[in-house]
Amino acid sequence: MTAPPPNRFQRWSNHLLALCLGVMAVAVFINVVLRYGFGSGVAASEEVSRLLFVWMVFIGATAAYPAGEHMAFTSLVGALQPHPRAMATMTALIRLLVLAACVMLAIGAWQQVVVGWGSYSVVMGYPTLLLPLPALLCSVAIGVFALIELIKRTPLDLGHAAELD
């Protein structure tokens, strides 16, 4: 079974992830060479790597949701397959729980964005609100995806239900 071709969102996400990873790898490599070879390093290397890693995690989490690649506990839903009404109810409940989690994450991330609004990183001087911002954007995006799936009554992807015993 082949996967469907990536859509524009997946392509952009993959490009952003590759860019983040590439910049991180180059920054860390240069820093290691400078430290071991010349006894000095680039102080900004750690900050840029930390910032890009946080963005990479949340870009990846956002891209994984519509692709159905998040961890899923589908045993109960898989067991309900012979009962379409119960399965639809459980699917709606799961989507509502995803929305609730997104709201909680968005509230916490927004509070951290507000805290970081007036402060700046020590070495590079970027606004520290850039660290919690991807969590806010991720929660909003996944919440929108889950809401659309809830409204459209999209069934859960049980592609790995064959592992059910």
Image: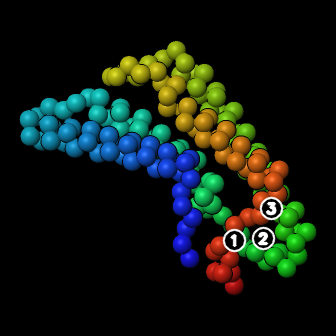
Q: What residue is shown with label 2? A: 77
Q: Please tell me whether mark 2 sits on a helix, a strand or a loop.
A: helix
Query: Tag 2: Cα neighbours inside 10 Å, few (<14), some, or many (≥20)?
Result: many
**Residue 158, numbered circle:** 1
- Answer whether labels 2 and 3 touch (C-beta < 8 Å): yes
23 or 76, nearer to the observer: 23
**Residue 91, numbered circle:** 3
Residue 122 visible in image = yes
Left/right of residue 47 with respect to residue 89 in the rendered view: left
Q: Could you tell me which residue is drawn at 27 percent across and 38 percent down?
A: 27
- Answer whether labels 1 and 2 touch (C-beta < 8 Å): yes
The C terminus is located in which quarter? bottom right
Q: Is residue 111 above or below residue 99?
A: above
Q: Amino acid at mark 3?
A: Thr
Q: Amino acid at mark 2?
A: Val
14 or 76, nearer to the observer: 14
Query: Tag 3: Cα neighbours inside 10 Å, few (<14), some, or many (≥20)?
Result: many
Q: Could you tell me which residue is drawn at 54 percent across and 72 percent down?
A: 2
The N terminus is located in which quarter? bottom right
Q: Could you tell me which residue is drawn at 64 percent across and 28 percent down?
A: 110
Left/right of residue 136 with respect to residue 40 in the rendered view: right
